[in-house]
Image: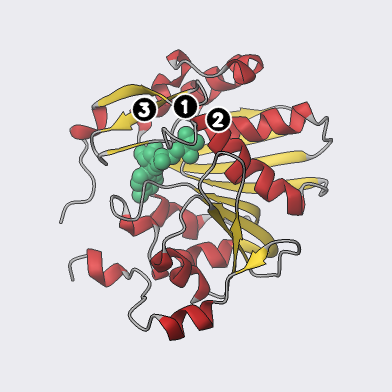
Amino acid sequence: MQWYDEVLRREKHSVLTRDGSWTLFSKEFGESYHSDRDGALHESLEKHVKSAFRFVGDRAHLTILDICFGLGYNTLATLYYVRQHHLPVKLHIISPELDRGLVESLEGFEYPREFAAFGPIIEALSRDFYYEDEQFRIEILIGDARQIVPQIRESFDIIYQDAFSPRHNPLLWTREYFAQIRDRIRDDGVLTTYSIASAVRMGLHENGFNLFISSGDQLRDWTLASPQILKGLTQIDMVLKQERNPNARSLRDADFLQA
Ligand SMILES: C[S@@+](CC[C@H](N)C(=O)[O-])C[C@H]1O[C@@H](n2cnc3c(N)ncnc32)[C@H](O)[C@@H]1O
């Protein structure tokens, strides 16, 4: 099966999400870039940024892998959070993205007013795929994350795992893909994802991640994962889950890639 379609990639339409922020619907993946119900900005801030900063936000330098850039909400919400809290942290964000045309179009996207101060950053990213000042360095790497991630030298404090859903974009949720991710996350790093699917959790567990449930106001639950124990969160007992449901299984490359 062909998982990517460059012609359909150009076809997107705008969707207003519940918190008043806009997202897009992708015809290529048959899915919105954000949950209509959770709200694009709300989801990004709560499920990714605040969830991760709760555990690593006191570090002087943070390296972040943002999978994948899309409309850049996770990257921009990170900058917003850091500025809002006057955090002195230096950020290095690396973000793979398949869709060059999307990134090039972002200068004209209607972002929420919380991102109003980031006009020059969005402009630089959509033109050069790169932005740097004394506090922030952001690199968008155009191409397939599966090929890009193994070539990255950095190891990451934070990984935002925010691909389209496992049903529509399974290659960014397989056991083999999570092995690449495990290789790039620091032992004291945190991965955030909106997915609560058993197969996703199994793939992370099989690569040595501990799994945790997170929840919030007006949001569906989400998952945090880390090689270390995240204090204050409910850990998911994956061994028990496996015993109770022996058919639960991680996604595998072989299920989706032709030999
Ligand atoms: C759900 S959207 C990401 C939303 C984004 N995090 C945001 O906050 O706006 C998923 C993105 O993954 C990109 N994508 C899909 N498969 C990819 C791949 N193999 N490598 C890199 N990017 C990919 C899509 O083009 C899309 O922009």
Residue 189, picture quadrant: bottom right
Residue occupied by mark 1: 18
Q: Residues within 10 Å of mark 1 (few under 14, many from 20)?
A: some
The residue where tag 3 is placed is: 24
Residue under the image location 68 percent in, 28 percent down: 80
Q: Name which residue lies at 58% across and 71% down.
A: 236
Q: Which quadrant is home to the C terminus? A: bottom left
Which quadrant would residue 157 be assigned to in this image? bottom right
Q: Where residue 5 is drawn, which disc sits there?
A: none
Please tell me which of labels 3 and 1 falls first in the chain.
1
Q: Which mark is residue 41?
A: 2
Give the image location of residue 29, x and y in percent: 27, 41
Instruction: Report the amino acid beneath label 2.
Output: Leu
Question: On the rendered structure, is 97 left or right of 183?
Answer: left
| Local secondary structure at mark 2 | helix
Query: Is disc 1 placed on a helix, strand or loop?
Result: loop
Q: 10 Å neighbourhood of mark 2: few (<14), some, or many (≥20)?
A: many
